[in-house]
Amino acid sequence: MKNVIRKGDIILLVVLILFGLALSWVSVRSNITGQKVIVRVGGKEYGTYMLDKNRTITIRQNGHKNIIEIKDGKAVMKYSDCKNQICVNHSEISSTRETIVCLPNKVTLEIEGKDNGGDQIDAKS
């Protein structure tokens, strides 16, 4: 059996790896420190809270309870009565486009910037 890996294959592999690393770097660099956290319950906005003010938010709905903590510019799901606890074990979030989701209780936290792209077109318009 002949050698199936050629010089061109190796060059292509190196180019693809470099391209992937460049995309990863751009993705990481595009995350900007957020200004606020949007809390949604059942897909509807529950509240918007600035990250520069420490606070605890308790959400009670449909017999479920979630506790969100905002501290030192970061948001975290401190408590949830859901079974799997993925949301509680999620790391703190503070950069734009980061989210924490509690699927069983239908609670989401999403970090947004100051204006979050104020030039965007409103989908309802």
Image: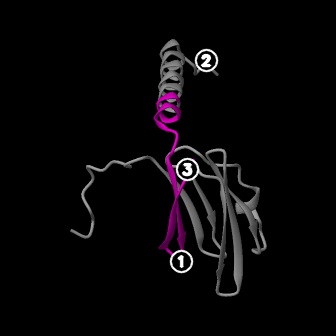
Residue at the limit of the structure toward the left, as seen here? 125
Q: Which residue is mark 1?
A: 42
What's the amino acid at mark 3? Glu
Q: Nearer the viewer, mark 2 or mark 3?
A: 3
Q: CA distance from mark 2 to mark 1?
A: 58 Å
What is the magenta range?
A: 25-52
Q: Mark 1: few, some, or many residues within 10 Å (few <14, many ≥20)? A: few
Q: Which residue is mark 3?
A: 98
Give how far across and how far down residue 9 sits, in percent. Answer: 51, 20
Q: How is the image coloured?
A: one colour
Quadrant in the rendering for residue 77: bottom right
Residue depicted at x 49% and y 38%: 32
Instruction: Assign the N terminus to one quadrant of the image.
Output: top right
Marks 1 and 3 close (CB-CB < 8 Å): no
Q: Which residue is mark 2?
A: 3
Vertically, is 22 above or below 38? Answer: above
What's the amino acid at mark 2? Asn
